[in-house]
Image (spheres, rainbow, N blue to C red):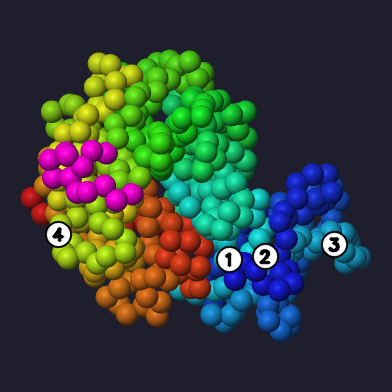
């Protein structure tokens, strides 16, 4: 769909010539919310126009008076591709500037769509065309901040644009915040009123980079390089769980060397100036070894990846890592055979590589998962894509799991299940994946990379969605 003949969307060009641009598209069942940034100095009216892509027919038009940057259209049909366009006019209704159009398709989405990129929309083609790597944090001021990158599987761009959004009403409404041009696979956190994100400058061959914001994500620093790639190693990371232990902040990253992915950690003293690259230590990496107890034959260079840093019950620092333990061209005999890998971090020697400890049964380890510790329930909780079929790419079931000891995990319940409700799109075309979350009282507050309603594939998602899963603690089985 990205190569529509005469594609009406265009790659956004930033500069003095840009007068107005659409910065967020959020479709819902029979409508869409469109947000813009307006750089016209004097204007009176703003107009949202919706057209059918195929026929060019105008099906909706709405005019607002002054100081409006979010407009909604309703009573639209599903399964139809539309174009949204915003125009600003003077007091005589004469057009001053018009945005580039954006593509969208209405439909039923799980949760609330924060941001959406139609698979045929080339607005962000300099980076890519699909929504990836969602993350969410709650700031000390109560605001929710989310981020996602924009990636491609057709080498369309550099896959390094990161977009930020804010909600000041607990996720009910969202607004666009800002963008960073060289940041992918980001992990966010706040310390002492400063918001940080650690990521990579490029997805294929990047440096490890940190950005910080002193104004809650509205503006960002220049890139602070924590580790530079060289002829032998480049860096990868993922939006995974981090931890604070031993007076240090710990985040799992990956070092890609000789075609193989190894897991490492970066860490810094919590009282250090985290804005300074010299405050951070990058450890050596542990690479997959098929001789590990419980390991399987190595069939790809990326056997372990996307590790969550967790504090174990004994106070030790562990990484629970995704493992691609089954070939993607063969069926999985039993979902119960899927396993995760636990590595131990030396908290007294931050530069030491993590050491393999054990494998554990973990239905969800074929895809990225996210784990936190629930202090109230005295239990670890995680969001995973568990397998319910023999299709190993299946990501259309998002489940809540829990554990007392990190070794034995049980499925509590499915939070989103598109498989068993006979959703109109099969597991190849839809997915609810790459969750990140925080715990807020008795709720899980999460964002998900969602592919649905005409996405390119389950993997190549078209939306970042927000979710609030209520009453979780009383559902745990002790």
Helix, strand or loop at disc 1?
loop
* Label 4 or label 1, whichever comes before in sequence order: 1
Residue at image coords 80%, 50% = 18
* Label 2 or label 4, whichever comes before in sequence order: 2
Q: In the drawing, what numbered circle is on residue 336?
A: 4
Residue toward you, 312 or 475: 312
Q: Which residues are magenta?
A: 288-300
Q: In the drawing, what numbered circle is on residue 89?
A: 3
Instruction: State the image coordinates of residue 53 (x, y, percent, origin top left).
Output: 68, 77
Instruction: State the image coordinates of residue 280 (x, y, percent, origin top left).
Output: 43, 20
Image marks 3 and 1: residues in contact by CB distance under 8 Å: no
Q: Is residue 398 left or right of residue 151?
A: left
Instruction: Nearest to the eye among marks 4 and 1: give it.
Output: 4
Helix, strand or loop at disc 4?
helix
Residue at image coords 59%, 29% = 223
Determine the image quadrant of residue 63: bottom right
CA separation, marks 3 and 1?
A: 27 Å
Residue toward you, 127 or 400: 127
Crowding around mark 3 (Cα neighbors within 10 Å: few <14, some 14 to 19, many 20+) is many
CA separation, marks 3 and 2?
A: 19 Å
Image marks 3 and 4: residues in contact by CB distance under 8 Å: no
* Label 2 or label 1, whichever comes before in sequence order: 2
Residue most toward the left? 478
Was residue 351 drawn as part of the magenta stretch in this picture?
A: no
Q: Which residue is under mark 2? A: 102
Instruction: State the image coordinates of residue 303 (x, y, percent, origin top left).
Output: 30, 46
Residue at image coords 51%, 28% = 230
Image marks 2 and 1: residues in contact by CB distance under 8 Å: yes
Q: Is residue 269 left or right of residue 330?
A: right
Instruction: State the image coordinates of residue 423 (x, y, percent, origin top left).
Output: 36, 78
Helix, strand or loop at disc 3?
strand
Q: Is residue 353 above or below residue 369?
A: above
């Amino acid at each position: 769909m990205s190569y529509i003949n005469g594609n009406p969307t265009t790659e956004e060009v930033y500069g003095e010539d840009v007068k107005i641009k659409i910065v967020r598209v959020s479709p819902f069942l029979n409508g869409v919310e469109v947000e813009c940034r307006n750089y016209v100095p004097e204007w009176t009216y703003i107009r949202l126009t919706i057209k059918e892509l195929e026929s060019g027919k105008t099906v909706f038009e709405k005019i607002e008076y002054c100081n409006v940057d979010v407009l909604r259209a309703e009573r639209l049909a599903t399964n139809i591709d539309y174009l949204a366009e915003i125009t600003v006019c003077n007091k005589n209704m004469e057009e001053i500037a018009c945005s580039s159009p954006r593509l969208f398709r209405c439909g039923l989405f799980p949760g609330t769509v924060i941001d959406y990129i139609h698979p045929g929309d080339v607005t962000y083609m300099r980076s890519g065309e699909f929504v990836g790597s969602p993350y969410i944090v709650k700031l000390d001021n109560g605001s929710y901040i989310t981020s996602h990158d924009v990636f491609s599987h057709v080498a369309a761009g550099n896959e390094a644009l990161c977009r930020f959004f804010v909600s000041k009403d607990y996720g009910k409404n969202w607004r666009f915040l800002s963008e960073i041009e060289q940041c992918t696979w980001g992990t966010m956190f706040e310390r002492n009123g400063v918001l940080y994100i650690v990521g990579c400058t490029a997805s294929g061959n990047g440096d490890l980079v940190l950005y910080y914001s002193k104004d809650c994500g509205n503006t960002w620093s220049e890139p602070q390089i924590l580790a530079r790639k060289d002829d032998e190693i480049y860096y990868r990371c993922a939006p995974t769980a981090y931890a604070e232990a031993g007076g240090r902040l710990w985040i799992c990253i990956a070092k890609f060397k000789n075609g193989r992915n190894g897991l490492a950690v970066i860490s810094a003293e919590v009282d250090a100036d985290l804005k300074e690259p010299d405050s951070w230590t990058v450890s050596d990496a542990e690479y997959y070894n098929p001789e590990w107890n419980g390991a399987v034959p190595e069939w790809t260079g990326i056997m372990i990846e996307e590790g969550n840093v967790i504090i174990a019950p004994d106070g030790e620092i562990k990484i629970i890592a995704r493992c691609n333990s089954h070939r993607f061209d063969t069926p999985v005999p039993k979902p119960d055979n899927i396993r995760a890998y636990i590595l131990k971090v030396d908290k007294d020697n931050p530069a030491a590589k993590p050491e393999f400890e054990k494998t554990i049964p973990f239905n969800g380890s074929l895809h990225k998962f996210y784990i936190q510790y629930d202090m109230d329930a005295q239990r670890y909780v995680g969001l995973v894509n568990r397998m319910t079929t023999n299709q190993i790419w299946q990501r259309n079931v998002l489940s809540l799991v829990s554990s007392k000891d990190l070794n034995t995990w049980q499925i509590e319940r499915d939070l989103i299940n598109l498989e068993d409700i006979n959703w109109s799109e099969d597991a190849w075309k839809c997915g609810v994946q790459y969750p990140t979350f925080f715990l807020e009282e008795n709720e899980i507050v999460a964002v998900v990379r969602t592919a649905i309603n005409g996405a390119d594939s389950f993997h190549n998602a078209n939306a970042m969605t927000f979710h609030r899963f209520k009453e979780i603690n009383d559902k745990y089985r002790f």
